[in-house]
Amino acid sequence: MTILVTGCAGFIGFHLARVLLERGERVVGFDNLNAYYDPALKAARLAILEQQPGFAFVRGDLADQAAVLALAEMHPAIDRIVHLGAQAGVRYAERDPFAYAEANLKGQVTVLELARRLPRLSHVLYASSSSVYGGNGKVPFAETDAVERPLNLYAASKRGAELIAQAYAHLHGLPCTGLRFFTVYGPWGRPDMAYFSFAEAIAAGRPITVYADGVLKRDFTWIEDIVAGLIGALDAGPAVAARPEEPGGAPHRLYNLGNHRAEPVERLVSLLERALGRAAIRETAPKPRADAPETFADIRRAAEDFGFAPTTTLEEGIPRFVAWFRAWKGL
Ligand SMILES: NC(=O)c1ccc[n+]([C@@H]2O[C@H](COP(=O)([O-])OP(=O)(O)OC[C@H]3O[C@@H](n4cnc5c(N)ncnc54)[C@H](O)[C@@H]3O)[C@@H](O)[C@H]2O)c1
């Protein structure tokens, strides 16, 4: 396989690319290395990938049509795309809404247009998010649930990207698989996410802001379980996309990739305290309008179609994250 991984310097893209390279695949990585969070972390991830002979990196912006389409001439052997590059984060949209329109909506179109121009392309996998379920009260969230009420622009852009993929699958027969990730955490993770920013604050003796007294629930999913799911979907091939939502429909299928456990945020905080050996200073604030009260994945579809079976509990994962965090921060 020759796999284009967009967002390869990002948290999930880095881990996926590393595993693919280790098993001997060729990986073309694409990323703009933007400064949404510490670019040193992206540079360090990229430096690890660049040590592998099967890796080629192209720096570019997903919204730059010419830069993305040029990949078809530069790397015509690409036969799979795993599109993970995006503007992530639910609250940053208040500061830069256009970043979501550019990276997540225009970026989805440029990547799918590239896919049409690659002669050997068989399958496009792309990242979606549990946030498409909005504030749905029915849990666990299943792929057949309604997703018409996003709580924030990030969620709206991810749902929009799913609909764009549906249109391409319908019009061009392009096999597309969308993966709705649920709160992914682990080593080399994202500093803008609560588990990471809480760890930084607790380690430094700074207060943390816990919304709604920590009763919000998240389905925290360990990065290696997510990578196993991505590889499962990649290896199952376009056949997974070819099981459409409706008989005779377009070759596009959506999957939840979560841990199938909804944990209160307060539980995350106590596990971080235990692993860091320091008490958190908690400040509470009401739930922001952009945040979902709960996320909880029904993962039966991914289990049935490509054997997805996450194994890592939050109790196991948080100490492993903290071990990496201490090394990264030199603590
Ligand atoms: N981490 C999670 O919990 C989670 C949950 C749900 C969905 N997702 C989705 O999974 C994917 C990967 O997320 P992640 O956690 O690795 O995030 P990340 O921010 O670490 O990685 C995204 C990468 O994309 C790159 N990028 C952003 N905008 C770009 C642009 N316009 N052009 C080129 N590159 C660009 C960034 O530089 C970054 O390296 C994203 O699509 C995200 O929305 C993540």
Image: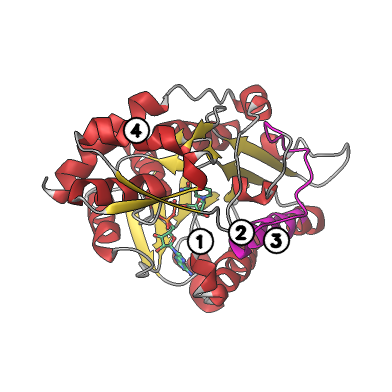
- Measure the alpha-carbon separation of dots 2 and 3: 20 Å
Q: Which residue is mark 2?
A: 289
Q: Which residue is mark 3?
A: 160
Residue 23 seen in render: no
Q: Earlier in the sequence, mark 2 or mark 3?
A: 3
- The secondary structure type at the circle numbered 4 is helix
Looking at the image, which residue is at 55% across and 31% down? 262
Q: Earlier in the sequence, mark 1 or mark 4?
A: 1
Looking at the image, which residue is at 21% across and 36% down? 276
Q: Is residue 239 above or below residue 36?
A: above
- Measure the alpha-carbon separation of dots 4 and 3: 36 Å
Q: Amino acid at mark 2?
A: Arg
Q: Nearer the viewer, residue 231 or 282?
A: 282
Look at the numbered discs 2 and 4 and tell me whether their residues touch, using CB distance below 8 Å.
Answer: no
- In the picture, measured across the screen, residue 245 lies left or right of residue 56, that is right
Q: Which residue is mark 4?
A: 270
**Image: magenta residue range:** 139-166
- The secondary structure type at the circle numbered 3 is helix
- In the picture, measured across the screen, residue 138 lies left or right of residue 103, that is right
Q: Residues within 10 Å of mark 1 (few under 14, many from 20)?
A: many
